[in-house]
Image: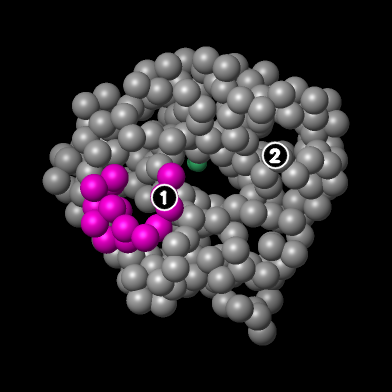
């Protein structure tokens, strides 16, 4: 089965690390991308370098965030239009690290989604519960709440068919060595598939799992039904680990 593997390099790799990663592994990345689809989400400053060094339109490049605004007096922010003009085709938004550390709200995240869609960038929208003790019904409520403004945007403002990616990442599994149990995950993805088909039937949606994806957890995670791929943080910054996850 062919999967979408999205690498979220966060702030782990500096410019010199990115140069080394791309130059050393360029050919192997291309080969892996023949069987699966790879998206590398780099820091804003390393985006142009990554695009130039990979020199390959097949491996897609993504940003890790964008401004909720179109343009204007927003010091330090990067617009969706600039991300698109730099050559990105994907962008992560709503990551729990930004929700928690930067206080991002569902409203801001929905505005970012709108900017990205208007600039033909596929948003990778992260959702997930914080506590490891949630029962399924509690998790459904949290996820639906995180998605509801996104539904409104896609229902009201942009009627034509749009591509988007939803990455379910239980926050407690991010950077951890444990993953949720199989039944819990299957139920979440079944539920997501149903609610998305109900609320935004005209959208073309892929579902990812993220949080603690490693070469040890990947075989268990591949058993989840209704899953199109994975969002991988730390393990994607080491090419050999990333490769072994993809080839597992
Ligand atoms: P992790 O991070 O793979 O290091 O757990 C995933 C993420 O935060 O997107």
Residue 29 vertical position relative to residue 244 in the rendered view, above or below: below
Ligand 1 within 8 A of label 2's CB? no
How far apart are the two marked residues, 2 and 1, measured between alpha carbons?
19 Å
Residue at position x 57%, y 22% in the image? 246
* Residue 242 visible here: no
Q: Which secondary structure lies at badge 2?
A: loop
Depth order, front residue of 18/223: 223
Percent x, y for residue 236? Answer: 61, 30
Query: Local crowd at mark 1 within 10 Å, few (<14), some, or many (≥20)?
Result: some
Residue 59's disc number: 2
Residue at position x 76%, y 60% in the image? 86
Ligand 1 within 8 A of label 1's CB? no
Q: Does the magenta stretch include residue 203?
A: yes
Q: Is residue 149 left or right of residue 165?
A: left
**Residues marked 2 and 1 touching at CB (< 8 Å):** no
Residue wearing tag 1: 205
Percent x, y for residue 89? Answer: 64, 54
Query: Local crowd at mark 2 within 10 Å, few (<14), some, or many (≥20)?
Result: many
Residue 238 vertical position relative to residue 205 in the rendered view, above or below: above
Q: Which of marks 2 and 1 is nearer the N terminus?
A: 2
Q: Residue furthest bottom?
A: 73
Percent x, y for residue 241? Answer: 62, 20
Question: Image quarter for residue 199?
Answer: bottom left
Depth order, front residue of 133/226: 226
Question: Image quarter for residue 134?
Answer: top left
Residue at position x 29%, y 39% in the image? 189
Percent x, y for residue 122? Answer: 55, 56
Residue at position x 43%, y 45% in the image? 206
Extent of the magenta region: 192-206
């Amino acid at each position: 089965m062919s999967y979408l593997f999205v690498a979220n390099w966060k702030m782990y790799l500096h410019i010199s690390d990115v140069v080394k990663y791309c130059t050393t592994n360029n050919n192997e990345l291309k080969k892996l991308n023949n069987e699966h689809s790879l998206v590398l989400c780099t820091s804003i400053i390393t985006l142009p370098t990554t695009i130039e060094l990979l020199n390959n339109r097949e491996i897609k490049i993504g940003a890790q965030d964008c401004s909720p605004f179109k343009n204007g007096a927003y010091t330090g922010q990067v617009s969706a239009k600039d991300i698109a003009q730099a050559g990105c085709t994907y962008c992560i938004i709503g990551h729990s690290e930004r929700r928690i550390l930067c206080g991002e709200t569902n409203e801001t995240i929905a505005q970012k989604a709108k900017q990205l869609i208007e600039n033909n960038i596929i948003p990778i929208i992260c959702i997930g519960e914080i506590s490891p003790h949630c029962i399924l019904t509690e998790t459904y409520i949290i996820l639906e709440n995180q998605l509801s403004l996104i539904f409104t945007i896609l229902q009201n403002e942009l009627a034509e068919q749009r591509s988007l990616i939803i990455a379910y990442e239980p926050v407690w599994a991010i950077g951890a060595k444990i993953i949720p149990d199989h039944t819990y995950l299957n139920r979440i993805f079944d539920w997501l598939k149903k609610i998305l088909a109900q609320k935004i039937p005209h959208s073309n949606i892929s579902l990812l799992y993220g949080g603690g994806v490693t070469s040890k957890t990947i075989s268990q995670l591949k058993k989840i039904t209704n899953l199109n791929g994975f969002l991988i943080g730390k393990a994607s910054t080491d090419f050999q680990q990333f490769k072994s996850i993809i080839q597992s």
